[in-house]
Amino acid sequence: MPDGNPYRIAGPALVSFSGGRTSAFMLKQILDAHGGALPADVHVCFANTGREMPETLDFVEECSRRWSVPIAWLEYDPDAPHHTRIVDHASASRDGEPFRAVIAARGFLPNPVTRFCTTETKIRRAKTFMHHLCGYAHWLNVVGLRADEMRRVSKMTDPVRMARERWTNACPLAEAGVTRSDVAAWWRTQPFDLALPNRDGITPLGNCDLCFLKSEATIRGIIRDHPELAAWWIAREAEARPAKPSGARFRIDRPGYEAMARDAERQGDLIEYLAQEGSIDCACTD
């Protein structure tokens, strides 16, 4: 990074904003390092799957407004040029339309081994934005991984892996030694915050609401508190069954969403969140 400051970004670059507290913290540090305004060749993108909580969408919009930073909202759309639609807070999908379109295009559900949902709704949308819409041949991809996520950082910045892509990954938070507690402490001093529960620095409802990569305990706890969220996931598994009569689920190593919703209704307050223990990493960040 220029001048030894990890937040001084040399473009062309893409700052990946997941809509969570950590990536928002990173964006603000980058803005401050550039005097409050990003260089013309440094872009900020938010990829919307349609399964983010409304509070996440509101938070992205508020960050953009309060910090006067343009944020490109991207969605998968099979009918749009390069399968990428540019939306905004008002027009963004709110019922999983991009995610459902990806499933329809593939003809089967994503799972922990074949995680094409993240690839299609997030990674390729960002790639399309930078390469096809902005015209860059190669760029820096700035990701909000912290110093307490070094296993993920090492994987993300592996030279062999990056050699296959049009971008080079950078993790300025990890380079600056920022941890989850640092991010939480910073947000306690701010005049606004993401309006989703923070459990020991983790946001169970962050990213896709009932993402199958979250731990079973987390999903059950969310369904207990927000039973209406289960309907979309139950419907997707039901739609997949005709092609796979033996039963189609996002994960075969635990009950389907319909069973978990039934159990949550029966057990009520006996279900507790278990943070993200047992969760599987994907390309999403906080």
Image (cartoon, rainbow, N blue to C red):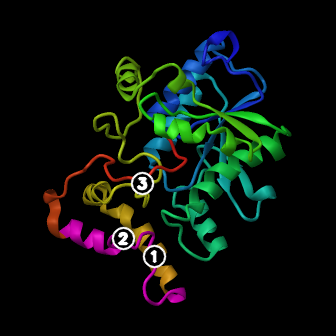
Residue at the location (63% across, 66% down)?
A: 102
Circles 1 and 3: CB atoms closer than 8 Å: no
The amino acid pointed to by label 2 is Asp
Which residue, given by chain and number where applicable, does mark 1 sit on? 237
**Could you say whether the residue bearing mark 2 is in a helix, strand or loop?**
loop
Estimate the x, y position of residue 261 in percent, counting from the top left: 29, 69
Estimate the x, y position of residue 195 in percent, counting from the top left: 38, 37
Q: Nearer the viewer, residue 260 or 163?
A: 163
Q: Is residue 103 left or right of residue 214?
A: right
Estimate the x, y position of residue 108 in percent, counting from the top left: 57, 75
Which residue, given by chain and number where applicable, does mark 3 sit on? 209
Residues drawn in magenta: 242-265
Rounded to the nearest angstrom, the CA distance separating label 2 from label 1 is: 14 Å
Q: Is residue 168 left or right of residue 55?
A: right
Q: Earlier in the sequence, mark 1 or mark 3?
A: 3
| Residue 66 visible in the shown view | no
Numbered label attached to residue 253: 2
Q: Is residue 213 left or right of residue 46?
A: left
